[in-house]
Amino acid sequence: MVLPDYPPPLKNGYDANESRTSLYKSRHISLQSHVDSLAAQSMYEYDNRESVPEIPAIYGGHGRGRSTSFLMEKKHSSLGPESMVYGSISPSPVQVPEPKPFQELKVGKLHEALFIGICVMAQFMCLAGLGQAIAPVHIIADGLGVTNPGQESWFAASYSLTTGTFILISGRLGDILGHKRVFVFGYLFLGIWSGFAGFSAYVGRQIFFDFCRSMQGFGGALLAPNALALLGRAYAPGIKKNLVFALFGAMAPWGFVFGALFGSIFSQLAWWPWTFWSYGIAAFALSAFALLIVPKQLAKEAQFAGQTHRPGFDWTGSVLGVAGLVLVNVAWNNGPLYGWSTPHVYFTLIIGLLCLVAFFWVEARALSPILPVAALNGTVTYTMALVGIGWGSFGIWIYYSWRFLEELRGQTPLSVSAEYTPALICGLLAAGATGFMLTHTPVAFTMMIAMLAFFIGHVIAGTMPVNQSYWAQMFISILIMPFGMDMSFPAGTVILSNHMPREHQGLAMSLVNTMVNYSISIALGIAGTVESNVNNHGKTFEDTVHGIRCAYYTGIALAGCGLLLGALFFVRTMMKEGWKVMQH
């Protein structure tokens, strides 16, 4: 196009050409902005992989007769003035999916009570699986020909190892396959391998029994996070949800005591394999019951209703995470058996730590991570650390308290199980108190009180003389420890459940259960290392007492660290937020 040669405007007075020049310049700027707008719009649609409609042929010719009126026809899109386009090309507005409103559980009162019951039984069965091998540990060891205390600790550690290791993966599987399906299969899997654990009496090999126990732990890993995910999807954040989670946590002492009680009854009065066979029968019954009771509203199809995007599975992160957690745990639990100077022990630990570093690196960049590293803020991370420290000290307390009463005081497994029954009532009281505190006090305060309970209960048990009445210190310790368990677990689950969307409740609940179970196994390995290095191989009674006492001191140190961190967490929260209670 040839531009007309307009003379410059006069400095003084009015020039008729001035208006024409202004008109031309405005049109020139308008045309340029229109072209830029078209280019920007084309780039926008290309970046968003949208198909760009072709410009009609009338706009592409070079003849004088082509129309330019399309450049002046403005069309306003829904994206606002800055996204205004011209002509027939208009962008597809970006559709941001609105969050789905929470749907209340539409079942009857009886059905709802049965649903809550079958879910909280998952926590009961997981802790019963731990207690059933701790109470009759010496009877099982005699049946398998095991005499080394370090090998006996694997009866409990192998179960907690796989439970803590595979919980993250099982929670993700629940997000993908449906929490109900994985939950029902978890009971079934737990029952199968409980039966095999009983049949290890015919095999007579400790390694086979430990493998069956680890497979039992995998069944527990399938249960716990998916049960919590079902409850998390069924109830909106509020008092009712807090109370349900508190009831779930209260099943921890009930499960352990009943598992230890029935394990003692079958081992002392019948034959120890019946401990695991009866447990397997109960698991089969619960699997069938869960299939019928869990509402269809929470099944896989309902879980992804109206969603076009389904969560993926991170295979690389899963392999690295499992390898790292297993190797680190095996190293810590083999340290007391072979000594830390043995090359395969510390090489296993180094390789495991490297796998964990690679795991976190991969998860920070994964599209569908097993562990949402980016979503973990400081408060959630600190809370999970407190849960791990507190429950690690609890694992030391429960294992060595049982050994103290059986080995040093000469009590039978059945009598020791009876002495732990006060924990049942205290567990319920602690659950009710936790439900109240979570709605009236900051979560940091609840966690600090839980750490205080862990510490006081451990100090009382770790300092009791051998020749002392049960009522003097052990009874008091048993009354206090459930408050640490049943305050720390619901607090952690409520925090993560409220920080994760409903379709990722399995992933959220997995973090708490991972810290609970894995920390127990690691802490037992640490305490076992201390015991084996100070007890002079248990040559005398005094050596055995000294070894158990030092293991207690290890748990006290761990609980004291948790109390210090919990107090700092509470003070920091008060300085930053004040007395802030969770909104419901």
Image (cartoon, helix red, strand yellow):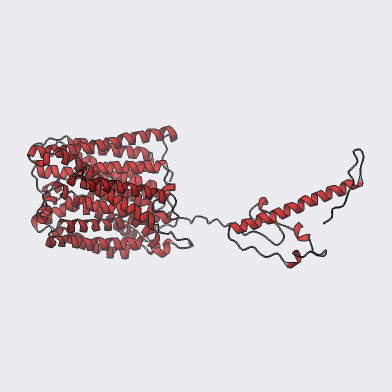
Give coordinates of residue 40: x percent, y percent.
66, 54
| Residue shown at 10% from the left, 44% from the top | 407
| Residue shown at 88% from the left, 46% from the top | 18
Is 454 drawn above or below residue 90 in the view shown? above
| Front in this rendered view, residue 419 or 46 | 46
**Splitting the image into 4 quarters, where does residue 436 fall?**
top left
Give coordinates of residue 217: x percent, y percent.
25, 55
The residue at the far front in this view is 343
Horizontal side, residue 234 vs residue 204: left or right:
right
The residue at the far bottom in this view is 57
Is 340 drawn above or below residue 142 in the view shown? above
Give coordinates of residue 233: x percent, y percent.
40, 56
**Splitting the image into 4 quarters, where does residue 461 fall?**
top left
- Indicate the quadrant containing the N terminus: top left, top right, bottom left or bottom right: bottom right
Give coordinates of residue 171: x percent, y percent.
35, 56
Is 536 drawn above or below residue 25 in the view shown? above
The reply to whether residue 469 is visible in this rendering is: no
Horizontal side, residue 515 vs residue 74: left or right:
left
| Residue shown at 38% from the left, 43% from the top | 381
| Residue shown at 19% from the left, 62% from the top | 196
The reply to whether residue 290 is visible in this rendering is: yes
| Count of numbered circles in the view | 0
Is 410 drawn above or below residue 58 in the view shown? above
Horizontal side, residue 104 vs residue 457: left or right:
right
